[in-house]
Amino acid sequence: MQASLKLFRIFGIDIKLHFTWWFVFLLLIWSLSTGFFPQFFPGYPITTYYLMGIVASLLLFVSVLLHELAHSLVAKAKNIPVESITLFFFGGVAGITKEDLKPSSELQMALAGPLFSLVLAGIFLLINKTIGNGIIAAVTFYLYQLNLILAIFNLVPAFPLDGGRAFRAILYLYYKDLKKATKIAAYGGKFFAGVMLFLGIFALIGGESSGLWFIFLGGFLYVIAKASYEQVVIREALSKIYVFELISKATTISPTMKFSEFVEKYKNITEDAFVISDSKFVGILDFRRIEQTSPEARAKLPLKQLAKPLSAIKHLQAKDSAYTAYRLFSEENLELLPIYENNKLKGFITNGKLMHRLAWNLKYGVHDDKNRNSKNSAKVNRT
Ligand SMILES: [Zn+2]
């Protein structure tokens, strides 16, 4: 089953629903119809409350989508590709794929979402004030509140929330050092996460079940703040290395060899990346296919059936950065990727070698090619 369902495409961006969204959607309808609306707007039949709950939940979904679209459209205006927007359990994520973001672009992109939520809050408040009371007033009041919360929550300087991204962009402009800027902004994220955890525990002790939400959100924010910083550290280390520096000749095995023979022959080799190749076929051994077959079948299977053909694998260019390789490894989920130069297969890079190099860079601060460094910083300044 796919984790996300594609809904439609707008401005060249795929809008997707993550499966976790459904849980929150149903939970929201239920809590609005049986809690919020009857409590604050009494006197209507239960079916009306359910109708209000469904409409309010759908419009909240539209509000979150518009918030993400605001980010994405600013990105597109800055020529930054946006592939998709995925709405998941408590918000949305715009899949923005650019590696080097100019801080001023990131600042504008980050602020566009919460500012648009503020505008939406204003619109819903205006409708609410114009109508006065009744069902529509109740629904618009709820949407005014939620959009306001969405805007304020996303303006807190807690990385990687929007406000934290804006904060990092300002720090980046000031220090001219992305790693340092991210580190400080991620501290903001962890601090805010700590505050939410503390408030959540406090609320729970006081008998408020909403404390659980704070604990959940705080914990989640802490984890992503930490992971986002690590991602920047990895990116910085790997973007200074060319993949051709890590090129190797992979162990090549005949496609007709049986899996049982292969296991026996290579049991003492630490390498876990293999090319399956003869005059007619070139592919990469895909260990996931092995896991999908029964133990009886896999003993007899020729390796060709456990290989992914080279033509079906995205490949790297010799001048690509090791960070591009890192991303491609997680995308393709293979241990080996082909490297091309002038449309010719030059060799392979293994995930093991990439990870080894990353570990050495991070642990021992290996110095990378100076030219590459200065070229990189020139590129950052120019873009
Ligand atoms: Zn946002």
Image: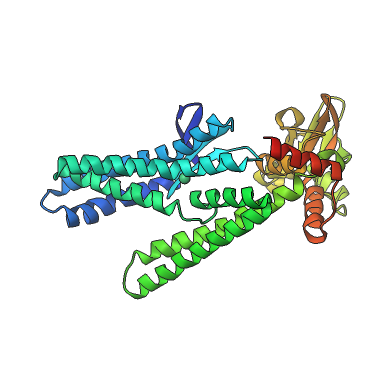
Residue 103 vs 256, above or below: the answer is below
The coloring applied to the image is rainbow
User: Which quadrant of the figure contains the C terminus?
Assistant: top right
**Count of labels shown?**
0
Check the image and name the residue furthest to the left.
43
Residue 247, by quadrant, is: top right
Check the image and name the residue furthest to the front.
174
Q: Is residue 264 left or right of residue 116?
A: right
The residue lying at 41 percent from left, 69 percent from top is 199
Check the image and name the residue furthest to the bottom.
205
The residue lying at 46 percent from left, 55 percent from top is 156
The residue lying at 55 percent from left, 39 percent from top is 95
User: Residue 163, how many percent across, how many down?
Assistant: 49, 51
User: Residue 355, how many percent across, how many down?
Assistant: 77, 51
Q: Is residue 58 left or right of residue 19?
A: left
Residue 189 vs 51, above or below: the answer is below
Residue 104, by quadrant, is: top right
The residue lying at 23 percent from left, 51 percent from top is 33
User: Residue 378, how many percent across, how many down?
Assistant: 75, 38
Q: Is residue 171 left or right of residue 363?
A: left
Q: Is residue 31 left or right of residue 345?
A: left
Q: Nearer the viewer, residue 109 or 346?
A: 109
**Residue 282 visible in the shown view:** yes
User: Residue 321, how many percent across, how many down?
Assistant: 77, 40
Q: Nearer the viewer, residue 252 or 69?
A: 69
Residue 313, by quadrant, is: top right
**Residue 302 visible in the shown view:** no
